[in-house]
Image (tube, rainbow, N blue to C red):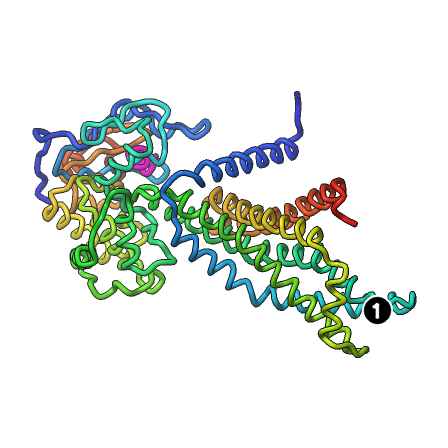
Amino acid sequence: MIISKPIKDFLEEAGALSIFTGRFFRELFRPRFEFNEMLRQCYFIGVKSLPLVLATAFIMGMVLTIQSRPTLVSFGAESRLPQMVAVSLVREIAPVITALICAGKIGSGIGAELGSMKVTEQIDAMEVSGTNPYKYLVVTRVLATTLMLPLLALVGDAIGIWASFLGANIKGDVSWDLYLLKSFDYLFFIDIFPAVLKTFLFGFAIGIVGCYKGMTSQKGTEGVGRSANSAVVLASLMVFVIDLLVVQMSDLYGIIK
Amino acid sequence: MKAARYYAHSEIAIEIKDLNKSFGNQHVLINLNLNLYKGENLAVLGKSGSGKSVLLKCIVGLVSPESGIVKVLGKDVLGLAQFEMDKIRMKIGFLFQSNALYDSMTVRENLEFPLRRHGLKYNKKEVDDMVFESLSNVSLPETAGKMPAELSGGMKKRIALARTLMMKPDIILYDEPTTGLDPITSREISNLILSVQEKYHSSAIIITHDINCVKIVADRIIMLIDGYAYAEGSYSELANSDDPKIKSFFE
């Protein structure tokens, strides 16, 4: 059977990425556990991305409020503003925006770092000196992104709602207590659960894709640039695909009301 | 020029038989045979892209060949389990062409990294002594707190060598140790290779195309041409050869 080259490349890449992911789970449960290195990565990935996540969530919360207001006013439903913004922020916008920002910042960072380690033989050196580079570099980073992204997204939720309160006060006048109370009116555990669940998956995808692209980087500095770049592109795409799947599934199971 | 010593009567440290390796249609190693004797410095001379680095990577198990036998200190390394391979690797030092210093770590952390292996336990005093000794060997004891990016090319090479010496390996594999360095630094590195041999009585394979380096360090030379050991001998034997392929290296 003749398969055209782009399709063949795509299938090969998907296969290689799947094998890489499979290896992650194999190595995950095998000792030795690089706990310190994982904490170090959590610091780099979590704390260092925090300012960026805060800034984007703040802006998204405020902008969403300002944009939604005229429409709601025209329906005479201005009092519903907090609920609407809170639900869209928590369910969709904060997780996805946080994931996209992290795909850009962390995905490219991991891709470039591991890529340059690969082309300057540092990964070979690690292997030769008796440290499994897959455990030391890949498992730690993937765990760190998987654990940190939900936290970042939750902080994003909080900042977004606060910014939305500020946005509502630009033209209106509402107290923080009332605004918060209204925001939580329509927020149920069942909203937050799938939203948090998908951020774990986003984090996992960003970590795996970044590491995969870095570890398979081609020779030369151009190769490093390309792995950083394709890590961002693929990770961002994965974020949307995962989002679509999770939303579809929560809809099918009747979680979205 | 080094007063070459003859080691063929001593034990074999590395034995390679009929080694074959190809990438796609490109055959880089074809039925390669090579022995490294204990205590000797063996230079492997060849053009760029002649598979010299691949040869070293086959020895430490970073590349697996299609066929052949690679024995390190009497043990066949092909198809060894990870755990067994790590034990062998403890006895081999590898100096990478690009130094392979970890950018994100200080010189000291770089040197301590090989000590992370399974089953090794040292107290702080022992580690300090080992780091100091290694750095003194390459006469850079004051660099411990620096990052690799702050060092010059020659210094990086020395630190990489110091890291290799941390485990006091029986065998050291040098992958183009002088490539990319100026002639004076190259000579310093070559002399360093020599002093390591004298101090630790280690055996070494030095992969290079730098004839001046070969002249200083080699006890024996193997010329790798077209994927196999084309010629073998001491520096003076090969330098006086009439074969055009050999002569081209010495001109």
Q: Nearer the viewer, residue A38 or B155?
A: A38
Per the image, the residue denoted by label 1 is A79
Image quadrant for the C terminus of chain B? Answer: top left
Using residue A98 as the reference point, say whether residue A142 is left or right of it.
left
Q: Quadrant of residue B158?
A: bottom left
Chain under numbered label 1: A
Q: Nearer the viewer, residue B97 or A167?
A: A167
Q: Is A235 inside the magenta-drawn segment?
A: no
Q: Is residue B244 visible?
A: yes
User: What residue sits 22% from the left and 29% below the top?
Assistant: B231
Helix, strand or loop status at disc 1: helix
Q: Main secondary structure of the magenta part?
A: helix
Residue at the extreme right of the image, as rendered:
A75
Residue B227 image offset from top left, x and y in percent: 32, 29
Q: Is B58 inside the magenta-drawn segment?
A: yes
Using residue A118 as the reference point, say whether residue A201 is left or right of it.
right
User: What residue sits 47% from the left and 60% below the top?
Assistant: A44
Q: Nearer the viewer, residue B111 or B100?
A: B111
Q: Quadrant of residue B123?
A: bottom left
Using residue B216 as the reference point, say whether residue A237 is left or right of it.
right
Q: Is residue B188 visible?
A: no
Q: Is residue A23 above or below residue A92?
A: above
Q: Which residues are magenta?
A: B50-59
Q: Quadrant of residue B46?
A: top left
Residue B246 image offset from top left, x and y in percent: 24, 34
Using residue B174 as the reference point, say whether residue A111 is left or right of it.
right
